[in-house]
Image: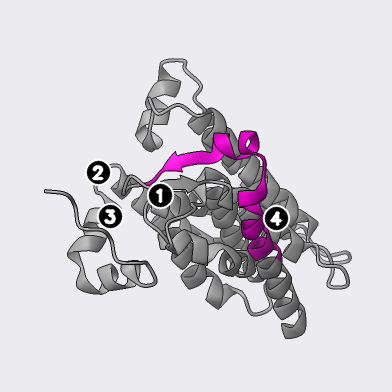
Amino acid sequence: MTAADGAARLALAAALSAAGMRLCPWLPEHTRRPWARTNHAGDPVTLLEGPVWLLGAVGGLVLPGTGGRTTAAALVVTAAGLGMLDDLAGSATSKGLRGHLTALGRGELTTGAVKLIGLAASGIAATAAVDLPRPGARAGAGPGRLAGVLVGGGVIAGTANLVNLLDLRPGRALKSVIVLGMPLSPGGAPAAAALGATLGVIADDLAGRSMLGDTGANAAGALLGLALVERSGLLARSLALAVLTGLTLASERVSFSAVIDRQPLLRRLDQWGRPPERPSSP
C-alpha cells in the first residue's frame, strides 16, 4: 500500500465516522434508546459511537481503487457484531475473564463468553488468511505455520479485549488506538482505517457525549491486532500475546484507572483533551 492509499483510507474513514456522529442525534428515539448509557460521572452517553466507528473503518478498508481489504473488513464486522451482542443483550452478572469462565464452568454461556470465543475464532481465521502463501511461493513448515496462526488469533482477540478494558474514561480507549496504530499505519491498511475512524469520533468521546462500547472497542482492537499480525512472525506475535495476556490477568486484580491516577504522567495524558470534571458534591 502506498502512502497516498493510506492517507486516502484514513481521510475517508475519518470523514465517514465524523458524519455519522453528527447524524446520531437525528436518529429516531426508539433507535437511540437501546444504546443509551450512563458513564462513570453519571452523565448520559450513547454507545452509537461504536457502530459509527465501524462505518468509518469499513469505508476506509474497502476504499475503491486501493485494493479492498476483505479479510480485514470481515474481521472488523465480526468483532463489532460480537461486541454488539454484549452491548445490547449482555448481562452485568458476570464480568471480566474470570467471571465469564466461571459462568461457563457452571454450564452458563454468557454473551461475554460467546464474544471471547468468537473473537478467538475470527482472529484465527483472519490470521490464516494473512499467512496464506502467495501463488508460487513455498509453504512454510506445518507446525510452525499452525503455531503462528493460533498465536496470531490470540493477539487479535487479546488486543480487542485490551481496548475494551480501556473504554472506561472519555478518550482513553481511542488514545490507545492512536498510540498503537501510528507505528503500524505506514503501509498498513488496517491501522490507517482504524486511525481515521478514531479521529472522526474522538471529539464526542473526549467531551463525554459518547463511548465506543463493546461494539467499537472490540472492532478497533481486533483491527489493530490484525495490523500487528500482518507485520510480525511467530516470535513477535508470541511476545505480543504474552504482554496482552499479562495485562488481561492484571486487570482481574488491579484497576487500570487507579494505576493511571497514581502516575502523574499517565494521569495527564489520560485527562488531556477532556473538559474539567465537575467537583463532587459534599
For marks 1 and 2, the one nearer the N-term is 1
Mark 1 or 2: the one toward you: 1
For marks 4 and 1, the one nearer the N-term is 4
| Residue type of the residue flagged with mark 4 | Leu
Q: Secondary structure at mark 3?
A: helix
The residue to which callout 4 is attached is 55
**Along the horizontal axis of the image, is 49 left or right of 62?**
left
For marks 4 and 3, the one nearer the N-term is 4
For the N terminus, the image quarter is: bottom right
The residue to which callout 1 is attached is 165
For marks 4 and 2, the one nearer the N-term is 4
Q: Which residues are magenta?
A: 16-39
Label 4, residues with CA under 10 Å away: few <14, some 14-19, many ≥20: some
Label 1, residues with CA under 10 Å away: few <14, some 14-19, many ≥20: many
Q: With respect to residue 231, does 109 lie above or below?
A: above
Residue 257, label in figure = 3
